[in-house]
Image (cartoon, rainbow, N blue to C red):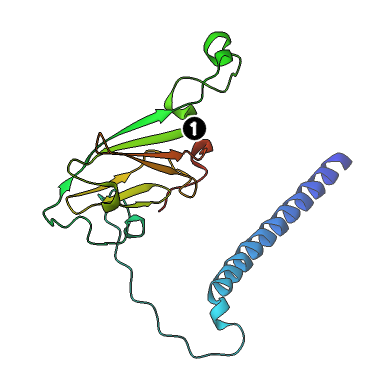
Amino acid sequence: HGYRQIGARSAEAAMNELSGLGALFSDSEKSQREWQSSRAQITPGNVGELVAKAPSQPAKKEADANAIWEEAELDEDDGFDQDDGRATAGYEIVYRQRVSPQDMFLGIDPTRNPGTACCENLIIRIMLPETTGSELDLEVKRTRLTLRTPKHKLRIHLPKPVDDDHGNAKWISDKCCLEVTLPVLEDWDGMLGGGP
C-alpha cells in the first residue's frame, strides 16, 4: 500500500515537472519570436542621430540572363572596329618553348610538356603587304595587340597574358612581315585574371 502512494506522488510530481518544462519552452518560443521581431527593426540606419541621406544612385540595369559578359568586361570603344576602308592584316600565332637536350632525350623536368601550357613566348607574325616599317603603329597590352598602318589594321585578343613591357618587335622587310615576340606570364590556374 505504501508503494502505491509513493508511486502516485512521483507520477504527480513528474507531471508537474513536465508541465513546468512545457511552460518554460512556450515562454522561450514566445520570447524568441519577440526578440526576432525587435531585431528586424534595428538596422545601422536607425542607430544614432538621423542624418540627411545622400541622393541614391540610379538603379542598375538588370543583368541579361543570356549575356556572355558584363559591361565592365568590355574594352573602351576607341573606334577601331569602324569600317574605315583599311584591310585586316593576316597573322599567325606561334608558341615558343625553350627546349634543352635534357628535355628532348631524358624528359628530366616533370613540369614541362610539349603543350602550349609550358611555352615561354608568343610569337605573332603579321603580314603587311605594301607597307614599310616606318608606317607601323603598334600597341601591346597584357591581353591584346593592336596594329595600325595606313593600309591595314589588326586587333588580336591574345590567348595568354603577356609581359607587355618586355616584348620585342622586328620588321622583316623582304617578307613585309612584322614579328612580335612577347614573354608569356605564367598564369597558375587563372590566378592573374584578365584585363587590358
The relative height of residue 151 versus residue 36 in the rendered view (above or below) is: above
**Amino acid type assigned to the residue bearing label 1 in the image:** Glu
Who's the residue at 29% across and 66% down the image?
61
Residue 141 coordinates in the image, percent (x, y): 40, 51
The answer to whether residue 144 is left or right of residue 154 is right
Check disc 1: other Cα within 10 Å, few if <14, some if 14-19, many if 20+: some
Q: Position of residue 125 (x, y in %)?
A: 31, 36
Residue at 22% over, 61% down: 79
How far across and how far down the image is residue 146, in percent?
Answer: 31, 50
Of 109 and 18, which appears nearest the observer?
109
Residue annotated with mark 1: 120
Kindly give the residue lying farthest to the top in the view shown: 105
* Apparent side of residue 99 relative to residue 177 in the rendered image (left or right): right
Specify whether residue 42 is in view. no
Q: Is residue 170 visible?
A: yes
Height in image: 58 above or below 96?
Answer: below
Relative placement, left or right, of 19 versus 141 is right
In the image as oriented, which residue stretches furthest toward the front?
174
Relative to 126, is 75 above or below? below
Quarter where residue 38 is shown: bottom right
Q: Residue sitting at 88 percent across and 42 percent down? A: 2
Q: Nearer the viewer, residue 102 or 66?
A: 102
How many numbered markers are drawn?
1
Q: Give 134 or 51, whichever is nearer the viewer.
A: 134
Closest to the observer, 61 or 182: 182
User: Which of the 4 quarters of the picture holds residue 59?
Assistant: bottom left
Secondary structure under tag 1 reads loop
In what quadrant of the picture does the N terminus appear? top right
In the orientation shown, which residue stands out farthest toward the left? 85
Q: Residue furthest right?
A: 2
Q: Position of residue 85 (x, y in %)?
A: 11, 54
- Left or right: residue 59 versus residue 26 is left
